[in-house]
Each structure stands twice: as structure tokens, then as C-alpha cells.
Image (cartoon, rainbow, N blue to C red):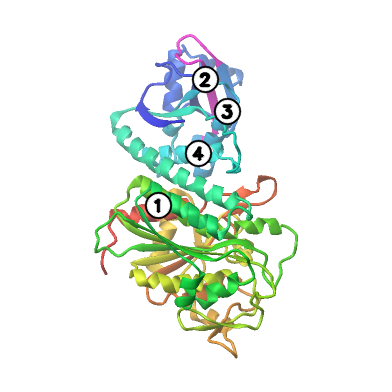
Amino acid sequence: MTYSVEIRSPGTQPTDCLIVGVYAKNLPPSTRALDDATDGYLSRLRKQGDLPTEPGDTLLLPERSGIAATRVLLVGCGKQTALTEERYDQIVTAAIRHLAKTQAKECECHLPDLSIKGRDTAWMVRAAAMAVLAQRYSYQDPRASEKRKPPADVLFCVQNRAELALAKTGLAEGIAIGEGMDLTRDLGNMPANLCTPTYLAEQAQTLAHDHPLKLTVLDQEQMEELKMGALLAVSRGSRQPPKLITLEYQGGNRESRPVVLVGKGITFDSGGISLKPGAAMDEMKYDMCGAASVFGTLLAVCKLKLPINLVGIIPACENLPDGDANKPGDVLQSMSGLTIEVLNTDAEGRLILADALTYAARYNPATVIDIATLTGACLVALGRIATGLLSTHNGLAKELLNAGQRIHDRAWQLPLWAGYEEGLKSNFADLANIGGREAGTITAASFLARFAEKYRWAHLDIAGTAWNSGKNKGATGRPVPLLTQFLIDQSRHSVGPS
């Protein structure tokens, strides 16, 4: 399976399948050229009402004189003025789904010549490549002996040399981000009996072997020496040993301070002694999607060879009930020295992140971003469309919001005002691990902020965006696009000493 870009007029060279778009009232440039090559055949189909015009509708035409292609796939695009990023993804996805039903081993795709206001050729090719990879993804048990048949190769076509350089950039970014999302999906979708903290450490070892990454894995004894009492308390109910995984990428100047990504790695969350309801508890294998997104982002950065320094920190453990598990009312000593009263053992993600955020300070970071499936309240507030974003640094929040808009992996900022800390007061410790029923996403971020006071920090709550439920159940690969776009932006103006 290969992806490539080329300057090519449609229908001029042999291909198994030629893919072009059709607007409701007119034709994109590539489709007009195809119409001219066939003496107005497509125009005649339009007059007859036979062209697909609704977004995602498709029509497969057999081999035809004047077109050097075995088949032509027409894809409806709706009104040109109404074409949006979501609709473009829908169009490319529909084309790839239909392509998969044919015997085509390679295709020539002209959909990047569609027009979305404010989006250039690089964006169109990147988004198309990401959509293709996303549509082709399906989880495969790593124990399976048979591998799937590779799908058709895709050639993305542009019309002139000025567009070619942009298209190459877009394709490289699209493939890197798409493959990073696939890794994130694979780890998220893997059952918890396979994807344990030890397995995550093994995957980090594989990643470090294949790419320029320095790996460090701390075991329980080493974390005890560092007095990571919050993280270790969560793991006490499990027979799976905890791991603190660190991957370092140095693509920038040696003196440049790194961006640090901290990903929550609860490989299964039963809630502990504060046991969750049984319904949909299987989905708690996705509670390590923050960690999975750090893996995916590191892979994308390595493939793009970004000139930036980056550190990924993954605190990994299970949260299970046991005679040795931490209990409501326990008081823990964190690595920072702050004490924490555990009011609910199901608010465990913030406990492991507390020690990981403290640990992050040793890298003298320019920026720290934690990523976590942290609160059901975020799903209630924002649904599955936007990732929750909270930060004590408005400049950083704006950078992340802008990155999300550019890549179309959007976040929404919630307030993080001083008054929200009131809910975390404890009579027996420096702070409690939960507040009341109200503003759950914000009080959780307020808790994390206490452990991130030494650097520029932001928190991404991906409880609503990391996976889908129901018939489409599965990891989404988000927010790898947002994080990678943020790092691309940072690399362009370089992260240096400050």
C-alpha cells in the first residue's frame, strides 16, 4: 500500500480507478477536464439527473472511450459554497468505501481539487490522506496469524507545479498523523488482558528501537524511591505492576527546552473500591487513551522529523478492587509533598497524573500538556465533538485552540478560575481528590494545576473524544491530530530557552 502525489490531468494515464467529485450545480476542475475528454458525457448525465450530487453519494462508471482508466468513481459533493471540513471527510470516506468494493489495486484521486474557504492544497491533501487511513483502519488482534490483504494504492493528483510542493507537504503530514492515530487506536482497542502496563512498556521499547527515541521505564521500586505515593496507591489493587514510561525525542537544539506530553495510562479502570456500575464497564479499557495518544504523537513527530525536543511521560497501572487497594478516606503523600485525601477511588486518573506532572519538572520543560480520559462531566458538557481544554496560561490555551481549528480536531476552553479550588478543600490533607457534583471537569483540572505550578501547562480532557460507543465502538485516535499540529506550529517558531 503506497500513497503518492503527482501532477496529472484526469483520464490521461492508465489506472484501475479514477475518483472525481461532482458539485450539485457545477463540476470541479478535474471533473470538467474529464467531461471535455468524453465530449460532454458527464454533462449529459447531469441533464438526465443521473450524476450523484448529494454529499457522499457515489456512481461507478465502467471503462469509457477517451478515459485511460478501467473505471471512474463519481462522488457527490453537494453545493460548492456549502463544502465544509466535515463534508470533505464524508466525501473522501465514501469514495474509499466504494473503492474497497471493487477489485482496483490502485486509484487516482482528484478530490483534493475541491474548494473549501481558507484551506489550501496542503490542507486538502493532508485531510484526504488522513480520511483514507481512518477509513482503512480496523483493529486486528496482535495474536492473529493471518494478516489482511493490503488495500489499493492511492495517488493524489494536483493540476500544476505550484500545488505539487504543497501537496507533498500535506501528504507527508497526513500519513504521519494517520499512522500515529492508527497506533493510538490499536492500543486503545486492545483488550485489557493484553494491553497491560507491562505491554505498554514493551511497545515503548519497540517504538524506541524503530525511531530515534530514548526510553526509560521506572518500576515500582524506583517509584517508591521517588515517593510517588499517589500513583502507587492506585496500582495497589492490581496484580499488574505499574510502570512509569518516558520517551525522549531530540530533534531541536540541545539547549532548547522540550515540550512534555503526559498521558494517563490506566489500562483498565474498575473504579477500585468505589466500583463503577457494570454497564459498559468493558469500555474502561479505553482509560489509557491519553497514554495511547502520546505514543501516536511521538510516532508522527518521528516520521516528520520535526525540529523540536519532545518528551512523552506515561504513568501506567490498573485500578482494581482488592484487599490491598486504596480506600475512600485514605490520605496519600504525593511526590510533590502535597497530601491528598481520597474521597473516591474512581477519581484515580488525577492521582497518577499528579506524580507524573511533578516528575515532568525535571526536564525543565517549555510546556507541559497532559492528556486524559479524566471526567464523565466533560462528555456531558461537550459531547463527542470537542475535547475539553483547561489551562492556567491563556497564551498556551490559544495556541492549542488554533492548532485544533487548523487540523480540524477541535477543543473548547473551559474556565479555570481560582474559585473552583474551594471544592477541593480537605479537613485532613492539603486537598481532596474530588469536589462536589458541580463543575467536575473544572475541579479535576484545578486539582492537576496544583502539581503543575512550575511551568506552562494545559490539560486536555478527552473523555468524550477518545472513543466511540455503540455500534461504532472503538478508539478514535484523537487528539493526535491536535497535538501534532501544535508541535508542527511550535517547531516552526522553535521552542528555545525562556
**Can you tell which of label 3 and label 1 is closer to the viewer?**
1
Q: Residues within 10 Å of mark 3 (few under 14, many from 20)?
A: few
Q: In the displayed image of the protein, which residue is found farthest to the front?
A: 221
Across and down, in percent, residue 258 comes to 33, 63
First along the sequence among labels 1 and 2: 2
On the image, numbered disc 4 is attached to which residue?
133
Pointer 3 with pointer 1, Cβ within 8 A = no
Range drawn in magenta: 62-79
On the image, numbered disc 3 is attached to which residue?
100
Distance of label 2 from label 3 (alpha carbons): 14 Å
Mark 1 residue type = Ala
Q: Is residue 77 magenta?
A: yes
Q: Residues within 10 Å of mark 1 (few under 14, many from 20)?
A: some
First along the sequence among labels 3 and 1: 3
| Residue at screen point 71% across, 67% down | 276
Distance of label 1 from label 4 (alpha carbons): 23 Å
71 versus 227 height, above or below: above
